[in-house]
Image: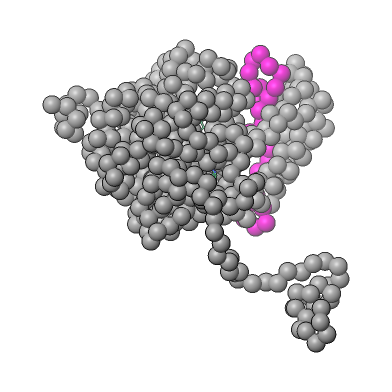
Amino acid sequence: MRRGMAVPVWVALSVVLGSRMVWPQADYVVEPQKRIPVIYDVDVAVAGGGVSGICAAVAAARSGARTILVDRMGSVGGMWGPGYKPPGGSQAPGPYSETEKADRYDKAKGGYPAIWVYPEIAGISKEFIQRIERLSDVDQLSQASAVSYVGTRLLREAGVELLVSTYVTDPIMEGTTVKGLFVENKSGRGAIKAKVVIDATGEADVARRAGAPALYPKEIYSQVDGHSPNGFGLSAIVGGIDWERFSGKRIEFPGRNLGGKGTIRPAPSLNRLTPHSNLAVFAMQLKNPEPPLLDYAKLNAGDGKDMALLETELRLFIFDAMQEYRRKAPGCENLFIVAISPYLGLRGGPCIEGEYTFTLDDAKVGKRFDDVIYLFGENRALQHTCLKEGKCKWVDVPYRVMVPKKIDGLLAVGRSASAIPDTALRNVTAVQHMGQAGGTAAALAVRKNVRVRDLNVKELQVQLLKEGFYLGDEARLRELGLRR
Ligand SMILES: Cc1cc2nc3c(=O)[nH]c(=O)nc-3n(C[C@H](O)[C@H](O)[C@H](O)COP(=O)(O)OP(=O)(O)OC[C@H]3O[C@@H](n4cnc5c(N)ncnc54)[C@H](O)[C@@H]3O)c2cc1C
């Protein structure tokens, strides 16, 4: 440093405070302009490779669009893949689902049907689950790898370019139109040009950064869905339990404060993974135990710092809780952690404000929409209509839940689509159908050279019917102009 040159404040501060480096506090820094290499130029770019993104990409590619899918994880499947989604609550063909359907539809037992997409799953979702069933048991651990495997195979077979371990950072914008994605990976920053982008990130990352109006989860939603807002969950798989001696009793464990943003509650129980294995699942569900108080609702799933804090504390908590089981629970002396899911699960989170916002009230009255893309049996709505009204109702999910207000060149599928409460459009089989509808729509828009918001939805519906989707009975199809 030349004599006489002013000493920067942060250097002076770090001297004053000893060896601890103190960085200057500033509201922002200006990122210098730079030329970003175009690494792909495609018709459709899908951000996020959960099951909704996989189905979107496969559908777009099968419809003839040059398609890429980008995911920040090393494997696809999202919550159902690396997230180890529990095996409940998915519709599947085959003996497992038939038994489940029969059991749960027995009104005498107080059940309701496990038919989420009426009357049966179709299209890529059906192919997907049939292949998974051939390759795995129904437990969440074996399904998780099978989901990633089958998802990757489906993408490859459809000719989708797959870019994993790559973070989607910002949309490429021209005015209010999304023209592609900036991504970051080991090579640095790259640009993917695309005619249509599909946001399947779960938290509508692309849409929010594009400036699209977004809906944020609200604490009050927990009154209609105990999993809302956000619906956080993280699973661990453990082994080494002596099941003969283990009472199954839950070990009480002090809660953990999330820096004033909530508390992680005492550890849940250990549930055997399958009757055949010695493994157990330890699932942290940050669920609302008693409405209306949900203190972790102050966490925002669209906030990087909040999510870093939650994820760090959850992982520490799971390990500490397991040590407590080892110390206190007979039969758990040799318990060990096989794996903690690498993917923090969310059932909801921020989503786009779409041209239409789907609500639980829509689901409860079984609302009909002319731009229907599939019929959905939202679980709380089925509980209400089947059990309280004595007649189950499935609702039309309209195309417009995927179309963001104000921003063009973009569709949002899965959890990123427009819904209140935030958790309403989360069921895996249902978001697969939405993904397929979104991917097909994107490819159609490219082919017809129209904006996704101007797409003739009838053409999309015709295509979906060909793929085996159910959009209503014959009379309804005539009403929609889809049958003569
Ligand atoms: C604990 C828990 C239990 C559940 N149990 C059930 C159940 O029993 N039945 C049921 O039907 N549903 C269940 N669900 C819900 C269901 O699993 C999810 O709603 C569904 O899998 C959502 O799919 P998705 O594709 O929309 O999102 P996700 O599966 O979350 O996928 C999002 C993908 O986007 C990627 N991504 C995100 N941001 C970026 C970025 N910036 N750049 C690149 N990639 C990005 C992620 O890595 C991920 O692969 C459960 C959810 C949780 C959390």
Q: Kindly give the residue lying farthest to the bottom in the view shown.
A: 4
Up-down relation of residue 404 to residue 385 (above or below) = below
Up-down relation of residue 79 to residue 240 (above or below) = below
Residue 103 in percent (x, y) is at 45, 17
* Front residue (pair 221, 150): 150
Residue 21 in percent (x, y) is at 79, 67
* Front residue (pair 289, 442): 442
**Residue 79 within the magenta-colored segment of the rendering:** no
Q: What's the magenta bit mostly, secondary-structure-wise?
A: loop
> Can residue 305 be spotted in the picture?
yes
* In the image: residue 74, left or right of residue 318: left
Question: Where, quadrant-wise, is the N terminus in this rendering?
Answer: bottom right
Residue 24 in percent (x, y) is at 70, 72
Q: Which residues are magenta?
A: 258-287
* Front residue (pair 464, 294): 464
Q: How many marks?
A: 0
Q: Residue at x 47, y 22 (%)?
A: 129
Query: Is the image coloured rainbow, by chain, by secondary structure, or in one colour?
Result: one colour
Q: Residue at x 79, y 35 (%)?
A: 323
Give residue 440's quadrant in the image.
top left
Give residue 393's quadrant in the image.
top left
